[in-house]
Amino acid sequence: MQGLYYDELEVGRVIQHAIRRTATDMDNMLFSCLTHNPQPLHIDHEAAAKTEFGKPLVNSVFTFGLMIGVSVNDTTLGTLVANLGYDKLVFPKPVFVGDTLRSESECIDVRESKSRPNAGIVTWAHRSFNQRGELVCECTRSALLLKKPE
């Protein structure tokens, strides 16, 4: 599967990503431990039970990584030169074990690269929603994408 070239994108295009994923306790524990995040809210069920949430929250960096990861196949696979940055990352609602997340990507800006004639800069708004349709993660991402080969 090939991602999209710079020339194939226009502002307003929204891609609904087919891959959905249910967050598991193992995902949360493994990700938190692999990234050396000792936050009890993620890894200690007893401590998390005493919070306003009553149970562990899924590590937000996992949620963010999953949202971006599912977007790659439909957007930048094989066409990405480099990620240039992520902005305005927000987590409006918590994610819990058992939540199933779906994501979408909207092209919000395209512009020619001044230094690379074979590439352009695309800005995406990436969003993830839980099974109730609640927004759980959103960010903007700028990426340098190749133009279609001539």
Image (cartoon, rainbow, N blue to C red):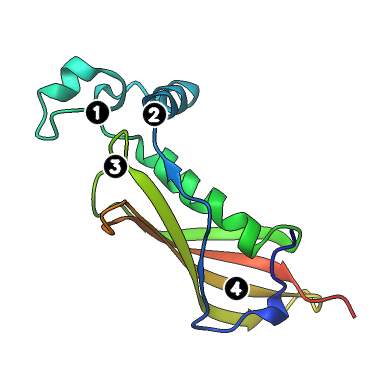
Q: Is residue 114 left or right of residue 138?
A: right
Residue 109 place in picture, x, y as percent = 53, 79
User: Which quadrant of the view contains residue 79?
Assistant: bottom right
Residue 81 place in picture, x, y as percent = 73, 61
Residue in the picture at 29% in, 42% down: 95
Mark 4 lies on residue: 122
Q: Is residue 95 visible?
A: yes
Sequence-wise, the earlier of marks 4 and 3 is: 3
Select label 4 or label 3 by which is in front. Answer: 3
User: Which quadrant of the view contains residue 4?
Assistant: bottom right
- Secondary structure beneath dot 2 equals helix
Q: Amino acid at mark 2?
A: Asn
Q: CA distance from mark 2 to mark 1?
A: 9 Å
- Secondary structure beneath dot 3 equals loop
- Secondary structure beneath dot 4 equals strand
Mark 3 lies on residue: 95
Q: CA distance from mark 3 to mark 2?
A: 10 Å
